[in-house]
Amino acid sequence: MADKPVTKRGRPSKAALQSTKELSKRQQAAALKDFRARLLLNPKSPALIEKMFEIAFDDEHKQQAVALKLLADRLMPVAGFTSDGKQQAQVSINISGIGAPSSGSVTINGNAGEEEADFEECVEDE
C-alpha cells in the first residue's frame, strides 16, 4: 500500500496564513467571493444554520455563549445600533452680500454633533 500524505484539519498554519498576505486585494476579494458561494451552495448549509440555533437556545450546551455571539453578530450588527452609523456630513454656509445686514452665520452639521457659530462681518465703505 502506498502511503498517502496526511491531510491536517483545523486551523491553518502560520506559514499558510502569511502566504495570504502576499495576495492582492483583488485576489483576496475573488477568494472570499468563491468561498461565500461555496458556503451558500453547499447542501448542508441549512442544517448548519439549524444546528447553530439549536445550540444557541440550549441552556445546557457548553458552547451556547459562542453560538449566541455568532448569531447576534450576524443578525444584529453593531453599526445599526450606533448613533453615527452611515450619517452624511453636511456643511451649510450662508454668505450675505455687501448691501445686506452685517452679520452672517455658519452652521456645520457633522458626526461629532451640531455646532453653530455666528461671525460678524466687517464691511468698510470705500
Image (cartoon, rainbow, N blue to C red):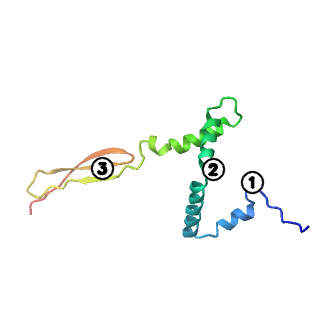
Q: Could you tell me if the residues under marks 1 and 3 are in contact, i.e. CB atoms within 8 Å?
A: no
Residue 125, above or below 54: below
Please report the residue visible at 50 percent of the width from the left and 43 percent of the height from the top: 78
Q: Nearer the viewer, mark 3 or mark 2?
A: 2
Which residue is denoted by mark 1 in the rendering?
10
Looking at marks 3 and 2 on the same chain, the residue that comes earlier in the sequence is marked by: 2
Q: What element carries label 3?
A: strand
Q: What residue type is labelled 3?
A: Ile
Task: Sort mark 1 into few (<14), some (14-19) or many (20+) by Cα contacts within 10 Å.
Answer: few
Quickly name the residue at label 3.
108
Number of the label disc, if any, that sits on residue 44: 2
What whole-number distance in Å separates the C-alpha atoms at marks 1 and 2?
Answer: 19 Å
Q: What residue is drawn where x is 56% and y is 66%?
A: 30
Query: In this image, 85 relative to 115: left or right?
Result: right
Tell me which amino acid carries mark 2: Lys
Measured in 3D between alpha carbons, the distance from the residue under mark 1 to the one under mark 3, in whole angstroms, is 52 Å
* Foreground label between 1 and 2: 2
Q: Percent position (x, y) of residue 61?
A: 70, 33
Image coordinates for residue 69, horizontal then vertical, percent: 60, 40
80 left or right, relative to 114: right
Q: What element does badge 2 sit on?
A: loop
Marks 2 and 3: in contact by CB < 8 Å?
no
Residue type at the position of mark 1: Gly
